[in-house]
Image (cartoon, helix red, strand yellow):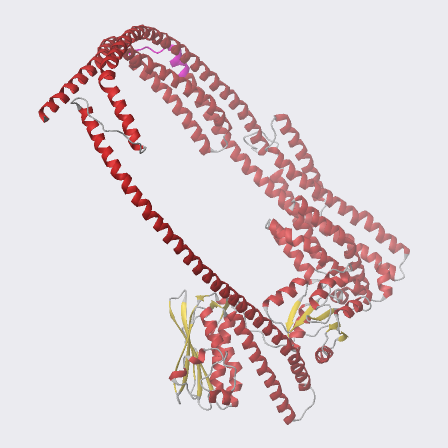
Amino acid sequence: MLHESSLSRTSLGRMLLMAFLVIAGLPTLTGLLGWIELQKVARNQSNVIQSAIPAISEVRGFTEESSRVVAVAPELAAVTTESARRERAAYLFAQVDALTGRVARYEGTGNVAPAGLEQAEADVRRAIERLDRLVQNRITALAAQHARLQAGLTATTELLEIADTLVANAQMGTTAMISSLYDLETGTPDPDTRLEALDKLIEVDLFRQALMSEMRSHTAEVGLLLNRVVTVQSPDALARVQSDLSGRIDIITRRILSVNDPIRAQRALALLQQIRPSAGPPPDAEDVFSLTKGILDLNRLIAAAQAEVSQSAIRLDTEAQALADQITRRAVAAGDAATAAIRATQQLYAWGSVAALLVSLAVVWIYVRGNITRRLDALSATMTRLAHGEEVGRITPQGQDEIAEMEAAVEVFRLQGIENHALEAERQQHLAELQRHRNELQTLVAEQTDQLRGEVSAHATARRQAEAADRAKSEFLAMMSHEIRTPMNGVLGLLRSLGRDGLTARQQAQLRAAHASGEGLMTILNDILDYSKIEAGALTLTEVTFSPADLLRDIAVLMTPSAQEKGLHLRLDLPPGLPAALIGDMGKLRQILFNLVSNAVKFTDAGTIRLSAVAEGSADRPRVIFTVSDTGKGIAAASQDRIFGVFEQEDAQTARQYGGTGLGLAICRRFAGAMGASLTVQSTPGQGAQFTLAAQFARGDPRDVAQGLPGPVMPPPMPRLQVLVVEDNDINQMVLQTYLEDMGHDAQLAETAEAALALLHQAHFDVILMDVNLPGLSGTAATRAIRALPDPALAGLPIIGISAHVQEADRRENLGAGMSAMLAKPLSPEALAAALHDHLPQRMALRGLVADLGPTQAALLARMFLDSLPDSQDRITTALRDGDLTALARAAHQVRGAAGNFDLPELAAHLARIERQASLAATDDLAHSVPRLAPLIAQSRAALLRALDQLDPAVTQAAQ
């Protein structure tokens, strides 16, 4: 049975093979005949490819290279640097070399290049060589012209400075003569003397000033004419510029000959000789004008050479086009032959394809459809019904070929489908049970989710409560700062005042003890506030350059009296290898070491306290080990970690005996951590303790170290000031009034900001002391209101804020509102005096000038300066708007020089800053500095007017 089936399959395969051979044989035969015909086409195409196409490609290269020559020749003619000339010339010669190579390759194929093509290539090469030589000569001439022109401009600049000096001297002479006329008016002048002085003013001084101004104007025009030389395009224009320059130089020469200063006159004539055009012919007198004329001639020759290059390239392109036409005709003839062979091949393919199609259709319709596809279609329909789950009757195989075996297999599939239906019903039952279990699980998950949401809500509520507690703590600390500092300001202020009255020795000792107790209370308050800043993350580092040796000496000097009072010896050890200067946060380092030494003095009853430092590690970033050791009571091992905690001490006995808050070491360790340092302790009870601070610093420049640390030194005496004190606390009013009266000032008190604003319009004040926390309108709001007043004299008054709130945010807010400075309570007289000195109103603006020139001349100069201020301010503003930084610097310099005659340091310093920024072309800085000039000018005007009011009215009236 198997053998018969195998024979049947072999018969079916043989019949399909025969059908395939018939279907595929005819196209194969057609293709063979077509291949024979295409051999002819291939021979024709080979001829075209091997001869015509390379020749056309070479001819196209002629056109491309000639086009590049035409395009780059103007670039060579326009270059002004030697490197650009060499680059363009090399490129053009490379294109000409490429043309020569193409001619050689074309002739190498057996063809003969036209004689006109080779001649055109040679003409192009000669034209490029001539253009290159001319451009090279022009570059050399341009360099010489630039050097001559720079020398002339340098001489013109120096000559302009000499002219400015001569104009200034003439103006000073005129001013002096005018001043002498005013001196004659104040006495009993002789009419003849007055007329002689007036004649000299008109005929000599004013005339000389006019001559010098004219000379300066012509000098500036000489510089402009020199700059125009490089822009002229024709010999006529160059001749006009030369004539104009010579005429102006002649005028300047005559003006210089009239100058009385022989040194400046001789130097000016020498400078004019460098600028003056030469009268001799080149090359004996090769000045900037002869060089410029030569450049104009070279430009004309370069234009002609460029035109010659273009014409030669066009002739080359014409010859190449003629050669291309000849080659194209040969290629067209070869193409026609190939087209005829291809047409014959196409006809053969067409008839062969029709015959193959007809035979193939007959084989497919008669055999394939009748014996294969109809049985397969029936089998496919049966399988489709089975796939859709329809019932199908038993399938009986027909025949003994492969299709019959497929029918038997489909019967097996039908039987398996019946079995699968039963299995599907069972599966659906199982799915229903799984769906029920899934619903139960979803219900359980939903219940757990609701429970978790409740817990999350509880956590959010707890977080909000914690944040509210933190805000409440910050507000409490701020309130504590204000409520404690305000009365402490009164206590310490009155104690300082009592210290200056005559007291007995015992009373003085009691007063010092009370003052020390108050300072101790302020230390505790500052520790609490410092730790609150650390917890709030507001701790910042301020790096400065400092001397570690000076820092340790200052701490030793400050703590030595305390140690000596207890009979202790404070020893300072400074090794020779300690760096002279370091860069780091000196303030926090000082606070750490001062706290450690203070604790050593506090907890040591007898013996020695040693403060030392040693450097190790690299020279650029040394590691400095600071050590504070004592011979005191020591610290138990179990307490050595706990003492660095917040509000922690060694034990309750220590707290009762020595006092303190337990914050000092906690703050020191936090500061050390912020600096990247470590603070450790080693101690044995009864033998003392040793604290070690190890910190790494960058090495600094000893020249950047500030010389000495500022101490509580009273500033130099000041003029008597009228001070408006705005303070609602009676005790603080008494303290401030006492401080001010001891300094020699007058104080007027106001309890509210509203009352202070009213007093400003009723009396004259030089400075305002403003408490920040006031009933009603706050001091910050009052400051904003004062700064917004229309009167510039009132709006510009210095306002020194006083507050018990020492947080940085509060300080920035008050300074941003317009306060000139901020002082923290409790207020010391030294700090108040320093603030008054730093912001002293310029009420004595004429003091120095009156001492030098007398009140009359001082008032006259002050009036002249006041009259010139609006024009000067307009010149500065206009120069900034026009972008003329030179004029801006000159105007600022002139106003600064005039302001330097008066005691107006802020105005003079700001004008110097504007002049420096204009000289450096710092336009961004000028955009901020120039607008700030207007309020300074207004304050200076008000200061001068107040100073004039203090002079004798008769003097002031005479100055008007």
Give the x, y percent position of residue 718. Answer: 71, 73
- Residue 721 visible in the picture: no
Left or right of 266 on screen, residue 458 = left
Vertical placement of 843 versus 575: above or below? above
Given residues 661 and 791, the one toward you in this image is: 661
Question: What quarter of the picture does the C terminus occupy?
Answer: bottom right
Left or right of 571 on screen, residue 467 = right
Give the x, y percent position of residue 787. Answer: 72, 61
Question: What quarter of the picture does the N terminus occupy?
Answer: top left
Give the x, y percent position of residue 378. Answer: 27, 23
Task: Identify which residue is drawn at 67% across, 31% down.
Answer: 243
Given residues 471 and 667, the one toward you in this image is: 471
Task: Identify which residue is drawn at 85% across, 52% down.
Answer: 198
Task: Identify which residue is drawn at 64% across, 36% down.
Answer: 225
Give the x, y percent position of residue 913. Answer: 63, 56
In the rendered picture of this protein, how many numbered marks are placed on residues?
0
Left or right of 851 on screen, residue 913 = left
Magenta segment boundaries in residue numbering: 110-121
Vertical placement of 249 versus 519: above or below? above
Q: Is residue 589 magenta?
A: no
Classify residue 371 by image quadrant.
top left
